[in-house]
Amino acid sequence: MREIVRLACDECKRINYTTKRNKKEKKEKLHFKKFCPFCKKHTMHKEVK
C-alpha cells in the first residue's frame, strides 16, 4: 500500500521531487532537506497533495 507523494520546497513552493510512502506505517507528512535547483541551495522539502 505504497503511495507516490510529491515534495515541494519551503522557500519557493515549487514541486521538485517525488518519493514513495507507506500510508499505514507513516501517518505524518514527510519532510527532507534536499537541494532545490530553483533556489540553488539546500532547503527543507515537505510533502504536498
Image (cartoon, rainbow, N blue to C red):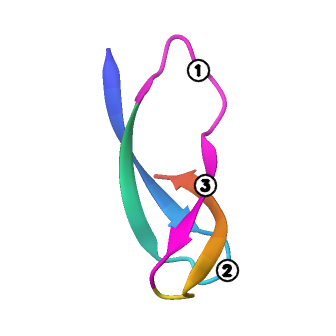
Pointer 3 residue? 46
In the image, residue 43 lies in the stretch drawn in magenta: no
Query: In percent of the image, x 64 and y 47: which residue is there?
Result: 31
Query: In percent of the image, x 47 and y 77: which residue is there?
Result: 14
Pointer 2 residue? 11
Q: Amino acid at mark 3?
A: Lys
- Crowd band around label 2 with a 10 angstrom C-alpha radius: few (<14), some (14–19), many (20+): few
Query: In percent of the image, x 61 and y 80: which residue is there?
Result: 41
Q: Which mark is residue 40?
A: none
Question: Which one is earlier in the sequence, the residue at label 3 or at label 2?
Answer: 2
Query: In percent of the image, x 66 and y 30: which residue is there?
Result: 28
> Dot 1 lies on which element?
loop
Q: Are marks 2 and 1 in contact (CB under 8 Å)?
A: no
The residue segment tinted magenta is 21-37
Cα separation, mark 2 vs mark 1, equals 25 Å
Cα separation, mark 1 vs mark 3, equals 14 Å
Question: Which one is earlier in the sequence, the residue at label 2 or at label 1?
Answer: 2
- Crowd band around label 1 with a 10 angstrom C-alpha radius: few (<14), some (14–19), many (20+): few
> Dot 3 lies on which element?
strand
Task: Provide residue 20's location: percent of width, then percent of height.
Answer: 37, 34
Pointer 1 residue? 26
